[in-house]
Image (tube, rainbow, N blue to C red):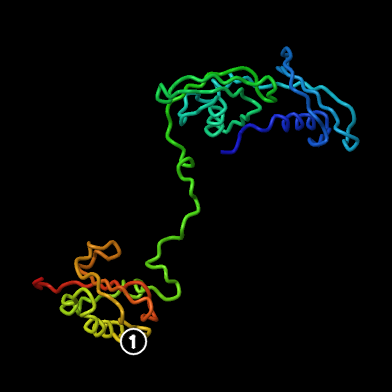
Amino acid sequence: MSSIYKDPLDQILASIKTLNNVDLVKAEYTYGAPAAVEADAAGTNTTILITSKDLQSTYDGQVTVRYRRLNLADLLTLVPLSIKANAPTSTLQVAERLNALYGLKFTEDDIVSTPVDLSGTNGAGTVTLVAKPTSLGWVGTVDVTLAQGAVPIGDKILVTNLPGLYMPNRDDTKPYGEVYSIFRDLSAYAAGMELLALGTGSLQDLATILTSVTGDPWVVTGASRYSLDGSTIVYNDVTSGDPRLKTNYERAVIVNLSTNLSLGLSGSLLLHYNLPDGFED
């Protein structure tokens, strides 16, 4: 979440520019520690000394300006301070949780960091945030009520370099057999498909069916673009038995193609068919 609070020093320099028409380049000056002073009618409660850094500074010398630091107690009226957090171990981590929830801009320069241990209360309890005296933007204290929160997703998902999306197989040198076959309806050859046995004994019968259905010259001997040599029928059953199959068909045959002899396709053939009405399985 981007911060709704701006850097205090940037705001101080912006106010100087608006009120005095003097544009101070931040890097050309040094800035003293903020000092608390009695609030005036304008509500300013802090002074800070701005000093030119060297001869390259556009303006020479030094000047003390007054401005108003924000009171942590004001957060009670600005944002909900009953929050969920995942086992914070310091007050600074509680402040950083407020940053994430509400777009605040607390840093280690703003909040006194002291240990927090809520292990005996299931992550619930009250934590007091105290502004550092040297904080440019904040003064005072405020209580934050905590309850155990969910574990941040970033704490658990540490390996973020993921593999590519799933493809039917990983041989990218040849078209996928799954894509070649999955859309084909072999129901007209259901009688022959039903008889195909697992293994390699029915490859010639399958080649005859594939040639008739696809018009491509499927063979069972030797390497070729459409070769079943070295292939294996690994499945011939209902389509619910394999997640790759289309369940709008009753049955399917799966054939694992040879990686070496099938020159035109890689992976597997997914061959779907429906049994004719009245067919006895």
Count the labels in the image.
1
Q: Amino acid at mark 1?
A: Gly
In front here: 138 or 5?
138
Q: Position of residue 28 (x, y in %)?
A: 83, 35
Left or right: 106, with 250 as reference point: right
**Relative to 256, does residue 106 appear above or below in the rendering?**
above
In front here: 48 or 70?
48
Q: Quadrant of residue 136?
A: top right
- The quadrant of the rendering that contains the C terminus is bottom left
Q: Position of residue 162 (x, y in %)?
A: 47, 55
Helix, strand or loop status at disc 1: loop
Instruction: Please give the residue where the numbered disc 1 appears in the rendered image.
Output: 222
Q: Position of residue 260 (x, y in %)?
A: 38, 79
- The quadrant of the rendering that contains the N terminus is top right
**Relative to 202, does residue 97 appear above or below in the rendering?**
above
Left or right: 126, with 45 as reference point: left
Q: Position of residue 174 (x, y in %)?
A: 42, 76
Q: Quadrant of residue 12?
A: top right
Q: Residues within 10 Å of mark 1 (few under 14, many from 20)?
A: some
Q: Residue at x 47, y 27 (%)?
A: 83
Q: Quadrant of residue 170?
A: bottom left
Q: Residue at x 28, y 61 (%)?
A: 243
Left or right: 234, with 127 as reference point: left
Q: Residue at x 19, y 79 (%)?
A: 189
Q: Residue at x 40, y 65 (%)?
A: 167
In front here: 226 or 106?
226
In front here: 4 or 27?
27
The residue lying furthest to the top in this view is 38
